[in-house]
Amino acid sequence: MANQNAQLQALVQTQVANANKVNTVTDKFPNFAVTLRHLCNANTDADLPTLWNQLANAPRAERTAVVEYALMTRADEVAMAGPVVTPELVDTLVGFRFTSQDLDDLTSGLSIFKIISAHDPQATAARNRSTVYATLQAGNVAPTLDDTKQLMESAPKMPSGLVALLQMLRAYSILLDVVFGGQHPLALAYQRFVRRWDQSSQNEINAHFDAHAIAPFCPLVVRRVQLLTQVWINEAATSLVLPVGPQDLPRYGDIIRDVTLRNWPSFQTIPRRYLQTPTPSRGTSGQLPPANDGGTGGASRGGGSGSNPTAERVTNTGPNPALTNRYSTHQGRLGDLIRQHAEHLPKADNDQDQICLSYCLTGGCNSNCRRRATHRPLTTTEEARVEGFLAAAGL
Ligand SMILES: [Zn+2]
């Protein structure tokens, strides 16, 4: 009996010790802590937004609740409705799926197209999915991939009108604040955009479009937010220095400028695969309606349109297999590799440009990459320098 008591007491003490142990973000998420700190402009784990330190210490089953609490707290602070927590949002955060390999996949990365505002009619259904998801995570048996997949919503959210659009734009602001911190340069730039959007742009759109043309136009605004934000995140994740200078942050103001100037063609960028019917030949007259009207007319723009200030995905059609195969053995993130081996970053033959490693090693990049001058076949000497970088990085 005494022996049993002693055992029990030891067990309780172990549990208490475990309960009191504070996990750092690096302890808990070693795969992405370095990139996360870089993106958040944080020197140490402690400098990261609260959400991350809470996630590092929450059991799997409570992650949904932790994310929800963080979103609600921020929403209260700024007196706006935040996003509803969904399984896909939790998955994006905890899986650190922030970057997007395909900018035309509207739901990849930290995309605004995943946002369901707390005011949205779908909010209740989304909350219910989260509850089931959290319950699954709490079980003794790990949920199967199928279980989880069924709870994931993969269709992009499309706002149906100006009110829904505003809710979506605002809710995304809350998410950026929570993920990066409310004083983060990206979050601040986006906050400014949302404030300005609120005041003037809706009137302009209302004045220009008749009622049934507004609904198809709204997703085009979301599309520009998604492109601008995702390009910045992709770029930031692989940059040495966080791109937060005046020229580096997403030009959200261009969205408002283009509404004010009625530059509607600049909004025609919903990827073709999301349109219900194939579109006829694209027009460039600038007098077309900006969106597809009931599924016809309008067009998504494929490759480079001169009037389109946003970036497109560029694919490396002639990659060097020796380099890509060698890189494919790397388990972690390219951005980590770049920062950890910065002194070995390869330069182009002109000795000025940095070679874009995303383009030559991962099969593609974005059209407004700052290293886009090297989005081309590399010379033999350049390839040798990329090999030198891989060797220095231990690959
Ligand atoms: Zn690039």
Image (cartoon, rainbow, N blue to C red):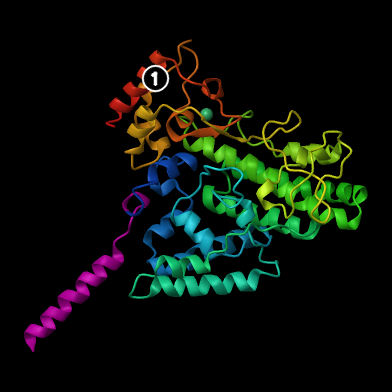
Work out which quarter of the rendered image holds the N terminus and state it: bottom left
Residue under numbered circle 1: 383
The answer to whether residue 244 is above or below residue 123 is above
Residue toward you, 27 or 334? 334
The answer to whether residue 226 is above or below residue 344 is below
Identify the residue at image location x=81%, y=38%: 265
The quarter of the displayed image where residue 308 is located: top right
**Whole-percent x, y for residue 52 in the image:** 44, 54
- What kind of secondary structure does the magenta stretch mostly adopt? helix
**Whole-percent x, y for residue 91 in the image:** 48, 59
Q: Is residue 41 visible?
A: no
**Whole-percent x, y for residue 48 in the image:** 45, 48
The quarter of the displayed image where residue 267 is located: top right
Q: Is residue 100 left or right of residue 249?
A: left
Identify the residue at image location x=20%, y=70%: 14
Element class at badge 1: helix
Residue toward you, 45 or 370? 370
Q: Is residue 159 visible?
A: yes
**Whole-percent x, y for residue 310 in the image:** 68, 35
Question: Quick check: is 355 in the magenta stretch?
Answer: no
**Magenta span covers which residues?**
1-27
